[in-house]
Image (cartoon, grey):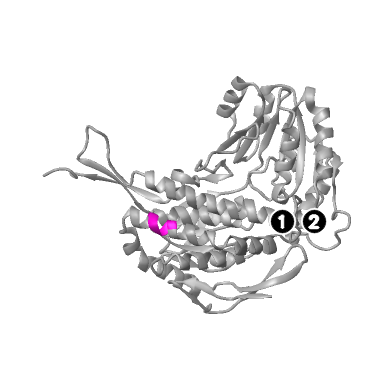
Amino acid sequence: MLDKRQFYINGVWVDPAHPNDHEVIDPATEDACAVISLGAQADTDAAVAAAKAALPGWMATSPEDRIAALERVYAAYKTRTEDLAKAISTEMGAPIALASTSQVGAGLSHLKNFIAAAKAFEWEKPLNADTPDTLIRHEAVGVCALITPWNWPMNQVTLKVGAALVAGNTMVLKPSEESPLDAMIFAEIMDAADLPPGVFNLVNGDGAGVGSQLSSHPDVDMVSFTGSTRAGIAISKAAAESLKRVHLELGGKGANLVFADADEKAVKRGVLHMMNNSGQSCNAPSRMMVEASRYDAAVEEAAATANKVQVGPPSEDGRHIGPVVNATQWSKIQDLIQKGIDEGARLVAGGTGRPDGLNKGFYVRPTVFADVTNDMTIAREEIFGPVLSIMKFETEEEAVAVANDTPYGLTNYVQSTDVDRRHRLARQLRSGMVEMNGQSRGAGAPFGGMKASGNGREGGSWGIHDFVEVKAVSGWASE
């Protein structure tokens, strides 16, 4: 069992002030794979004090020096990809192939994109050609608390750290206590990048402890959080006392609109996207809405696709899905699957219980419901597991109305060969992102949502903008 009972504060590894051990559970075996310490108030205070002390010097560095630092982080990250993949696979159950490519690769891509975005970013510029005497400066927000989730850990860590670092902020990272091992490797990466002491700090902890302490700390200027909507609301309330800036990336209930003219791979593509990472993605297309003339065939194809999705140990190579992260999440998913059955949805694949041959581990059967109506629980709540709900619509207007009839607004999807329709829907769907015909967002495109899915944007220049203050300086060019 790994022993990781230290924090990274002020450029060194330190023992916690008041050790409170926490076992990290391997979701494939249900056994402890590591022990970490959860931080106490003294640990949080020490990390924030280190970040505060380092802030004046770091924010005064040139953009070129900060970009060079991020380039060193990127180079160090590339040397630890295998270690990161093994940690992610063990702690949160991602199959090793997925962990090695998508999970670890996401972090690599984000760091690279931030380097490019920072080089093109206008850190200082005149207001416009007619007012050269007024300068617009982009400066660091200050001490940033970065609170990250377990489901795509390196994706979220790099989205926050990369932007905060290159913008001149200092930071305290609190990774999820469910998946802290990759973050501790990332702290080693940051150490190898030779940053000034205190610029980057890591304190393990849970939401009620270190998370709450950071959210309410008077010396923290900004909280960037990714996680549940419930936790995001709590953080916002805690941060309001000191008027902190709060950046939230929260849950989702994405609609995937499949029209009769969609390409022949649209349904299969939607099912596999839903099952990816065992359904543990906030931007998962969990509501497949199908035009009536194609509905019956789509249900049959979706069921057949889900039945072919293999479930197995994360340590085995191959294109299968692993377990969900923990017992609490497994039980929640089971309850929601049963709720779908009880409320009258038609189960066409999967169901409750573990897949055949897997009697231990938090494995979930790839599940598809048909004939789902918009008032059912499985159509309203974020399940965060490999569970797809299929709904029928008659008209484009109905599809838009139902797609938007949700508290969430992260990602919606459109499958249609009609260009005019796609353009209409891009304007009408209430979400921070709309992806069409399986086309992923371009490198550096902003990630974020509306409504209960949060605020702010991550990635590329938009991610940097979220970590800067805008200052107007008059009399700049005057003699």
Q: Position of residue 283 (x, y in %)?
A: 63, 44
Disc 1 is placed on an element classified as loop
Q: Position of residue 61 (x, y in %)?
A: 31, 59
> Is 49 situated left or right of 34 in this image?
left
Q: Nearer the viewer, residue 317 or 148?
A: 317
> Is 437 situated left or right of 372 in this image?
left
* Pointer 2 residue: 312
Q: Is residue 167 above or below residue 135?
A: below
> Answer yes or no: do the residues labelled 2 and 1 have beta carbons within 8 Å?
yes
Magenta-highlighted residues: 67-71
- Residue at position x 48%, y 59% in the image: 75
Q: Position of residue 471 (x, y in %)?
A: 30, 47
> Is 80 situated left or right of 417 in this image?
left
- Residue at position x 67%, y 64% in the image: 91
Q: Amino acid at mark 1?
A: Pro
> Is 68 situated left or right of 351 in this image?
left
Q: Which mark is residue 165?
A: none
Q: Nearer the viewer, residue 424 or 94?
A: 94
Q: Position of residue 268 (x, y in %)?
A: 76, 36
- Name which of mark 2 and mark 1 comes first in the sequence: 1
Disc 2 is placed on an element classified as loop
Q: Is residue 411 above or below residue 463?
A: above
Q: Which mark is residue 95?
A: 1
Question: Within 10 Å of the Cα at label 2, are there few (<14), some (14-19), or many (20+) other Cα atoms?
Answer: many
Quarter of the picture containing the N terminus is: bottom right
